[in-house]
Image (spheres, helix red, strand yellow):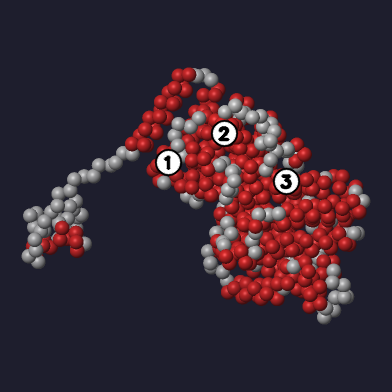
Amino acid sequence: MHSSSRVSVACEACRKRKRKCDGSRPVCSYCLERDRACEYTAEKRIKRRVDPDYVRTLEDEIAMLKEELAQTQSSRPAVLDDDIVHAQAESKRNSEEDGAVAIQDSMTTAIEDQFLDSETLDQLRRDGLNRGLRLVKTAVLAAAALFADDAQSKAIGDEAAAAFDKTSLQLCRELPEISTIQALSIMSWRELGLEQHNMAWMYNSMCASLVIHLGLPVIMTPEEEPVSQTSGELSTESKIRATRLRTLWSSVLMDRIATSLLGRYCLIPWRRIKCSSFLSAVGPSPSLDELAFDSQCRLWFIHDQYMDKIYSYQFSELDSAERSRVLLVARDQLLSFHQQIHPSLLISSTSINNQTPTPAMIYLHISYHTSFILIHRPYLKAAVRNNLTTYRLAIRSVTTAAASIVRLLRTHAKILPLSSAPPFIVHSVLTAAVTHLCNATSTHNTLRSQSIAHFRVCFRALLVMQSRWAKATNALRLLRGLARRWRAMGALPLQYGFEVGEGGGAEQTGGRMAKAESGEEEEGEEERENIDAEREEDGVMVDSEISWSWAANADAVNPNYDGNEMDIFDSIHPETFVLDTDYRQWEWSMGCDI
């Protein structure tokens, strides 16, 4: 009878046939029954290989810690560095154990062209970093962990963020340099992604203060720079200038994103910025991502100039003609910007077939259409509706821009999951979704049908993004609340079109969302999606500003239609906006106190 216990070494015959060997020597039972040669191979125990680089890294860190401890036993800077080094040492140890070093790769694609150049990113992968780069690396790990899916990597990011948070004020006092600005900007991005508005604004404020303190907004242009004595000095000065310029524009863009998401005023005024463009810091052959980032900077710089006027308290005091003039000038500037976008960044049906757009290109165009909506939306207020020409221009423009965002979301979903999009894209999707939901209150059949179809594209995009960003979850809750208030619950996908109740309603809704995302949708929803597709095909021309007359003629048989094509817009009911504490922050940030 064969033994049921497992033997340490099996014979070669049993190994090849994957048979259970009883380990009997010199011949096992299986080979004895079949009269086969039974051979045992003596194996040497494989010693665990020790990575010499890892050992040297630990030795260097120990030596560094001993040196710092000896230099300043009771000094505050020593406590600062020890916290940061401890967070990095812990993350390095964990990454060596389970491969969490992949965080650095996600950082390369997620934040590279916004905050750090490729050379700095390469330096962060090395050992023996100076104090400033150790600080930046801590911020990078904290932010990059938001793109990780495993609990271990997220824990590393939380630990790095905690170490940074504990020493942030001391950093501004003792290390007022470029690396501190970069780290604060990255941490502001992280806190925005986590919906921690207070800390996001604190980091953004500290970053803006250092930017102004170090004089970055007035970086000298190449023509104004003093001529160096040697080519080596010139090269060093140019490199420093490029780093300062890149840091300035990344901080300015982060400031604009934070103010748009939080509904606040910019901390780095556009009137105080006098320097060359971002592209002058990247060399003669910029990449597509660098071109897109430069365009983002120029776009939000233009946006800020007119947002200051349109969203100011004095705007309501202007007469109708002056308000219209401000809008027309802002429109001209945005349209001129769009015409000047580099040809390689343009996205059209032709370019998509020939070349797949990068995510950075898509984000640029989404930001452009978002800016277009935000510039026009204050003109939808009841106080401005006495100027019908301006009002109708505004409603037509925001509708067209929102439809363009829907097309870009579909393009993004074809090349990359929307869960990989940065957090500020959630704000753009929400902006478009609210526009489509408002249009869904129209009594005009064609506009209402296509608005519902477009709204559901935005809604499902937020469902995908909520797995990564808490802001998307809040946006979904907001949209369901607005749909109920505007009596447009029919615009929601079937499994989400229930009243938002008290108590456990949110949890039940979350369960239904998770069920839908896992593919367990009801058959009725599939039929609803087919109807959506038909609606989009029927109303495809409504996306274009020049096609509103066609839409009106198509619905001329409607008994409610009196022959005026602009009644399409007058049939929308934005007065259903209701101010209360649950939605006040969103309405302030969107300028929608109608």
At 40% from the left edge and 46% from the top edge, which residue is drawn? 98
Residues at marks 1 and 2 touching, judged by CB atoms closer than 8 Å = no
Q: Is residue 287 left or right of residue 29?
A: right
Residue identifier under label 2: 235
Pointer 1 or 3: first along the chain? 1
Task: Measure the C-alpha gap from mark 2 to mark 3.
Answer: 29 Å
At 68% from the left edge and 60% from the top edge, which residue is drawn? 405
Where residue 469 appears, as percent x and y from the top left, is 59, 51
Residue identifier under label 1: 94
Question: Is 551 in front, or is 423?
Answer: 551
Where residue 126 appears, as percent x and y from the top left, is 45, 37
Task: Measure the C-alpha gap from mark 1 to mark 2.
Answer: 39 Å
Residue type at the position of mark 1: Asn
Residue identifier under label 3: 301
- Can residue 469 be seen from the camera position used here? no
Q: Is residue 561 left or right of residue 25?
A: right
